[in-house]
Image: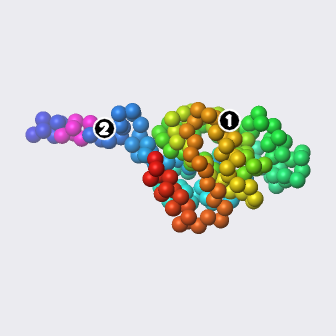
Amino acid sequence: MNKIMMTLAAVMTMSFAACAQNKGGKNMETENKPLVVYFSATGTTAKAARMIADITDCTLYEIVPQQPYTSDDLNWNNRQSRSSVEMNNPKSRPALKETKMNVRDYNVIFIGYPIWWDQAPRIINTFIESHDLEGKTLIPFATSGGSGINNSVKELKKTYPNLEWQNGKLLNRSSRSDIQNWVNGITNKL
């Protein structure tokens, strides 16, 4: 009886270990779920990111600047404002509060941001350059007061040509069903 119990215990332990890993050693719980990362200076992009994470039942990660942006920093009418200075310098890389997120276990990553000067804010570059995203499918989404997303995606593709970018989506005032349809359309193609 003891031998049977020991054998069953060994088999169960090996089964649990096998369930926790696949051939590549990745966590099966996260490997097929997307990751939603986002930067939001005013909360608008955060709302869209939370909705995507809720719809996809995935992990949500906020890109947080080491130095938070104030309303004066975001004044696009002031050429000396922090955001204006950063966006006028393509090499600007604002520091992150937390630089590492474990992206290894995720194959699909939604990257969200507000549109600044028709581009993704430079802190998005900081995030991308702080992580190994090769082999990941990257899906940009954005919010904007007046610009579209196309130029920002074009610039990201040009800056990071070795990454696998999908076309992005502007999610201004998008309803849950609009976002659900967009996410379903993307995930059906992957």
The amino acid pointed to by label 2 is Ala
Residue lying at the far left of the rendered structure:
1
For the point 64% across and 35% down, the residue is 160
> Which residue position holds label 1?
159
Which picture quadrant has residue 11? top left
The amino acid pointed to by label 1 is Thr
For the point 39% across and 43% down, the residue is 28
Instruction: Answer left or right for 86 relative to 188.
Output: right
For the point 44% across and 42% down, the residue is 31
Image coordinates of residue 132 in percent, x first then y, are 57, 33
Scheme of colours in the image = rainbow
Q: Which residues are magenta?
A: 8-14
Instruction: Answer left or right for 160 relative to 68.
Output: left
Image coordinates of residue 165 in percent, x first then y, are 58, 42
Of the numbered discs in the image, which one, if any, rests on residue 18?
A: 2
Which picture quadrant has residue 43? bottom right
Q: Secondary structure at mark 2?
A: helix
Q: Main secondary structure of the magenta part?
A: helix
Residue 141 seen in render? yes
The label nearer to you, 2 versus 1, is 1
